[in-house]
């Protein structure tokens, strides 16, 4: 659960993360070179259990809702060696799985309170007309 361990080292909240996983291996194809191919996909929806974290009444951390998704394309020489035909070459080659992976993360929303907007406005540097003239 959140708020355990040393404060300040990690998130001060817990998340709930439903996931969907999908995969397809091509071992049922007739073409020998395509049989060791596998494709996988994943999507996660990460939802925080608290909207924001405050320290002494000041917003210290916004807790975003995030969507994480990705896919892999794999070519298993281990599968090729075991089920299609034996591979000639070094032993390490017989157990190799070539993997191309892509992962993405998208911020879905944050629950920033409206009171943080004026604070951000105060943080802006003064406009050039507000600065004193230096002659």
Image (cartoon, rainbow, N blue to C red):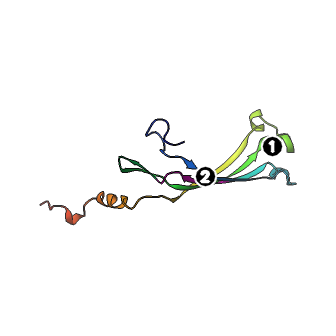
Q: Which residue is mark 2?
A: 103
In this rendering, the label closer to the viewer, 2 or 1? 2
Magenta stretch contains residue 49 = yes
Q: Which residue is mark 1?
A: 79
Q: Nearer the viewer, residue 74 or 18?
A: 18
The disc label shown at residue 64, or none: none
Mark 1 crowdedness (10 Å alpha carbons): few <14, some 14-19, many ≥20: some
> Residue 105 in the image: x percent, y percent?
56, 54
Say whether disc 2 or disc 1 marks the residue closer to the N-terminus. 1
- In the foreground, 112 or 21: 112
Image point (49%, 35%), residue name: 5
**Range drawn in magenta:** 42-51
Marks 2/1 in contact by CB < 8 Å: the verdict is no
Q: Secondary structure at mark 1?
A: helix
Residue 2, how many percent across, how many down? 51, 43
Residue 76 falls left or right of residue 113: right
Q: Main secondary structure of the magenta part?
A: strand
* Magenta run includes residue 25: no
Q: Which residue is situated farthest in the top direction here?
A: 91
Query: Is 84 on the left or on the right of 17, as rendered?
Result: right
Which quadrant holds the N terminus? Answer: top right
Q: Determine whether 132 is above or below 53 in the image.
A: below
Q: Residue furthest left?
A: 135
């Amino acid at each position: 659960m959140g708020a355990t361990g040393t404060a300040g080292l990690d998130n001060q909240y817990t998340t709930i993360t439903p996931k969907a996983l999908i995969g397809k291996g091509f071992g049922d194809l007739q073409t020998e070179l395509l049989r060791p191919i596998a494709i996988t996909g994943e999507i996660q929806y990460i939802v925080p259990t608290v909207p924001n974290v405050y320290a002494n009444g000041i917003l210290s951390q916004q807790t975003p809702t995030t969507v994480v998704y990705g896919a892999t394309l794999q070519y298993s020489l281990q599968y090729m060696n075991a089920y299609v035909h034996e591979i000639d070459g070094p032993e390490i080659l017989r157990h190799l799985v070539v993997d191309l992976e892509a992962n993405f993360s998208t911020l879905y929303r944050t629950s920033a309170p409206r009171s943080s907007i004026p604070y951000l406005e105060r943080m802006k540097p003064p406009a050039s007309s507000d600065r004193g003239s230096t002659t």
